[in-house]
Image (cartoon, rainbow, N blue to C red):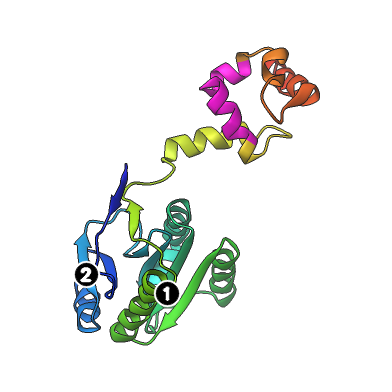
Amino acid sequence: MESQKIFKSEKKVVVVTDYREREIADLLKESGAIVNILNLEIGDFVCSDRLAVERKTHSDFVSSIIDGRIFEQTENLLHNFQKAIVIVEGSSNRNINENAYRAALAKILVDGVSVISTKNPKETAQTIYWLAYKEQIENKSPLAFRVGKKPKEEKRLIEEIVASLPGVSSVLSKRLLEHFGSVEKIFSASEEELAKVKGVGKNLAKRIKKLATTKY
């Protein structure tokens, strides 16, 4: 989908909020923010074109680790925004193996998503407000974002198929797909045609062609 722009005043921050986050939306308004409520596919709050926030109660955060949902959500955040933050709110008696919890937390952090703990909804709203303030007022980052997933799941899978070839990076994978248009055309191309793509060269072209034609 195309980018959607949210227009705002110069002196007030605007937070785009998912329609299911009414409590936080009301608290954001009390803090002085202008709130735009939408049906967000990715994240719960958008603070700028590059920063989005996913809010979890502690109980839901633990549940999302157990069923793996949090990893899909953070992956989608990173595909759509430069910066992604998960806010874990409050505490709960929901049990989880400590090593499993720390391993999941480590994965989220290493993948590039920040995790912030808050005590209650009010503190969550204040955190989101100041994130938006920092982005929009101090960093002058515009509030524009894509509503749909980027890239689309199917497109990403196609890129990963090509990137799984030895010697082919994610950048080169996209370059090959842009040049030939499909995985099928890449595998049916001659060595000479493959070598014409920037970054491939004769040796890699020969390896790709050999893998494409070698019998199982």
Give the SS element for disc 2: strand
Q: Compared with residue 157, is residue 100 higher up or lower down, i.e. above or below?
A: below
Q: Is residue 123 left or right of residue 183?
A: left
Tell me, yes or no, if residue 19 can be seen here.
Answer: no
Q: Earlier in the sequence, mark 2 or mark 1?
A: 2
Which region is colored magenta?
172-187
Q: Is residue 5 left or right of residue 49?
A: left
Tell me, yes or no, if residue 145 can be seen here.
Answer: yes
The residue at the point 25 percent across, 78 percent down is: 28
Q: Which residue is mark 1?
A: 138
Packing grade of label 2 (10 A; few <14, some 14-19, many >=20) is some
Residue type marked 1 = Glu
- Residue placed most toward the observer, 184 or 195: 195
**Magenta run includes residue 100:** no
Number of residue marks: 2
Q: Which residue is mark 2?
A: 35
Residue 130's tag is none
